[in-house]
Amino acid sequence: MSDIIAVIPARGGSKGLPRKNVLPVAGKPLLGWTVEAARASRLVGRVVVSTDDPEIAAVALRFGAEVVDRPAELSGDSASSESALLHTLDVLRGREGYEPDLLAFLQCTSPLTAPEDIDGTIEALERQSADTALAVVPFHYFLWRPDGTGINHDKARRPLRQEREPQFLEAGAVYAMKVPGFRAAKHRFFGKTALYEMPAERRWEIDDPADLEIAGALLRRREAADRQARLPDRLGALVFDFDGVFTDNRVTVLDEGREAVVCDRSDGLGLERLRRAGWPMLVLSKESHPIVSSRCAKLKLECIQGIDEKLPVLLRWLESRGVSPEEALYLGNDVNDLPCLGAVGCPVAVADAYPEAIEASRIVLSRPGGRGALRELADLILNRYGTPHHA
């Protein structure tokens, strides 16, 4: 098995779109998407970000990459990506004696790159006994010179797409190369080059603000589809914690000692749609405050509150409805939800849940508690199932 490293060059200077490598895209810094894809790769054993910028370095470390500090002379507009890759290899060899067999060069300006694109490019290199490889997408367009003559076609004859020789566009997202050959050639396309055809919808490079908006929309749609795909084949009942799910986990204490919380109206509409579709729902809360029962009554939700041990109550309620724990969903946000999250077939956490709850969950929503998480979950369930399986 080859020892494979992924290196992501990410310098701080960007004239076209300042600070673009750390700008938010669909809730994450741009660099974060590529680091996550590299870390999720089956084949990559190590992920390193080469940068001259402290903020970029901090983002890289936060998302789980290592960092190699790039010197100023390799960080200007005229510096090549290859120089950053070679510098990273030299630093790791000098510091640790580490020398990988293969190098995957990833561009952080391609946030839609998926782990399978990284693995696919590496596998194309190995399968075709090549020295280098790159990700490409099909190209079916006619190119023209300024003088009005065709580049890849004869303008006097416009062949149909199926009649044309296949052509491909360099995706700019993933490259792979054997390290000894790369060190000798000092460029990414030495020797025999293999192609990996990635889906065209994942080829999107960030160069200007409009690219950020489009990539953000595509990433949000992809993440929603991924969350929906993680729902189990069968689902029969839904159970929710209250604090931190219906609310943002904060409480306002008024002068006279009364408490108030903030809820999201869109959550109420989502729950109403679930109720009308016939979904059995229960709110389980350790909190005994009448706010809980009042809100649930308004939403026409069954509520059991003031309980220290939620799990036995949850299991009894499911049994009374004829629903097995494997066909139940539990939505929580904190450590006291862990027993219930571990007992059901579909544990779910809100976006701002505590790390332990996120780690225990099959699905992590994009919306935080009290700010649309329940509506997001309702949309996922209704789009996937419509009605519960036992109905």
Image (cartoon, grey):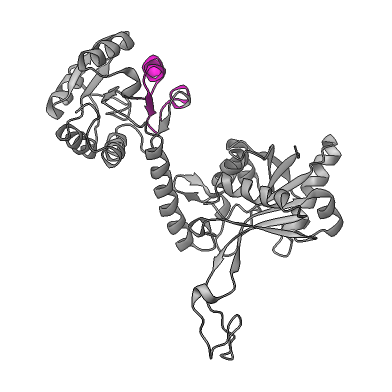
**Quadrant of image for the N terminus:** top right
Q: How many marks?
A: 0
Q: Tell me where residue 149 appears, x and y as whole percent.
A: 58, 89
Along the line of sight, the residue nearer the viewer: 83 or 190: 190
Rendering quarter of residue 290: top left
**Quadrant of image for the C terminus:** top left
- Is 189 covered by the magenta stretch? no
Along the line of sight, the residue nearer the viewer: 350 or 124: 124
Seen in the picture, residue 238 relative to 305 is either above or below; the reply is below
**Is 338 positioned to the left or the right of 148 in the image?**
left
Residue depicted at x 43% and y 57%: 213
Q: Tell me where residue 284 appears, x and y as whole percent.
A: 26, 17
Residue depicted at x 59% and y 73%: 165
Q: Tell me where residue 156 appears, x and y as whole percent.
A: 53, 91
User: Magenta residues, as a range?
Assistant: 331-358
Residue 256 in view of the camera? no
Q: Tell me where residue 276 appears, x and y as whole percent.
A: 14, 34
Residue depicted at x 24% and y 21%: 283
**Is 366 positioned to the left or the right of 300 in the image?**
right
